[in-house]
């Protein structure tokens, strides 16, 4: 089982509310939103949940994140990539994983931006 499959299995075995976000500068966000809406047949906009637009910062692309609380049966691989969440949404979620490939995989499994 690959790492993305193990994270999906973790979510399926530990039902919990999660939050998926994309963070980027506006120019990158516009491209992301267009591609997301087209590929996943959605109609999100810049003001929707899960969109975190950055100002004029030195960031080259998008960053996709998953926020969650329960870590029971989380694989060692993902435990090593997990952060204790101390800033954005810290009052709601204890942990986050920053991984574009994982989140794209989750989108392909039916997960969406925002709350799941």
Image: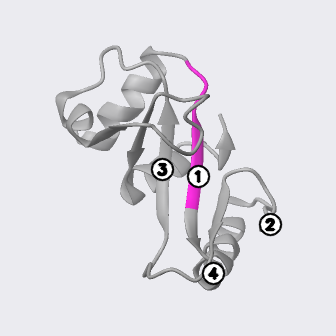
Q: Earlier in the sequence, mark 2 or mark 1?
A: 1
Residue 59 shown in magenta: no
Residue at mark 4 to residue at mark 2: CA–CA distance: 11 Å
Residue at mark 2 to residue at mark 1: CA–CA distance: 13 Å
In the displayed structure, would residue 13 be above or below residue 56?
A: above
Residue 17 shown in magenta: yes
Give the class, few, some or many, for how many residues have Cα within 10 Å of label 3's Cα (few <14, many ≥20): some
Label pair 3/1, CB-CB below 8 angstroms? yes
Q: Earlier in the sequence, mark 4 or mark 1?
A: 1
Residue tagged 2: 45
Nearer to me, 95 or 86: 86
Q: Residue at x 46, y 38 (%)?
A: 86
Q: Which residue range is magenta in the image?
A: 16-22
Q: Secondary structure at mark 1?
A: strand
Q: Secondary structure at mark 3?
A: strand
In the displayed structure, would residue 2 be above or below residue 60?
A: above
Give the class, few, some or many, for how many residues have Cα within 10 Å of label 4's Cα (few <14, many ≥20): few
Label pair 4/2, CB-CB below 8 angstroms? no
Residue at mark 4 to residue at mark 3: CA–CA distance: 18 Å
Q: How many marks?
A: 4
Residue tagged 1: 21
- Return the x and y of residue 94 as percentages of the image width and height: 47, 27
Would residue 62 be found to the left or right of residue 99 on screen? right
Would residue 11 be found to the left or right of residue 35 on screen? left
Residue tagged 3: 65
Residue tagged 4: 31
Q: Earlier in the sequence, mark 2 or mark 3?
A: 2
Q: Secondary structure at mark 2?
A: loop
């Amino acid at each position: 089982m690959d790492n993305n499959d193990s994270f999906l299995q973790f979510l399926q075995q530990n039902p919990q509310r999660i939050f998926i976000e994309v963070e980027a500068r506006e120019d990158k966000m516009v491209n992301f939103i267009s591609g997301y809406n087209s590929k996943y047949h959605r109609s999100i906009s810049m003001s929707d949940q899960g969109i975190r637009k950055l100002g004029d910062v030195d960031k080259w692309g998008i960053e996709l994140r998953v926020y969650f609380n329960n870590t029971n049966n989380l694989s060692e691989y993902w435990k090593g990539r997990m952060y204790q969440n101390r800033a954005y949404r810290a009052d709601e979620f204890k942990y986050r994983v920053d991984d574009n490939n994982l989140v794209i995989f989750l989108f392909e499994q039916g997960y969406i931006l925002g709350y799941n």
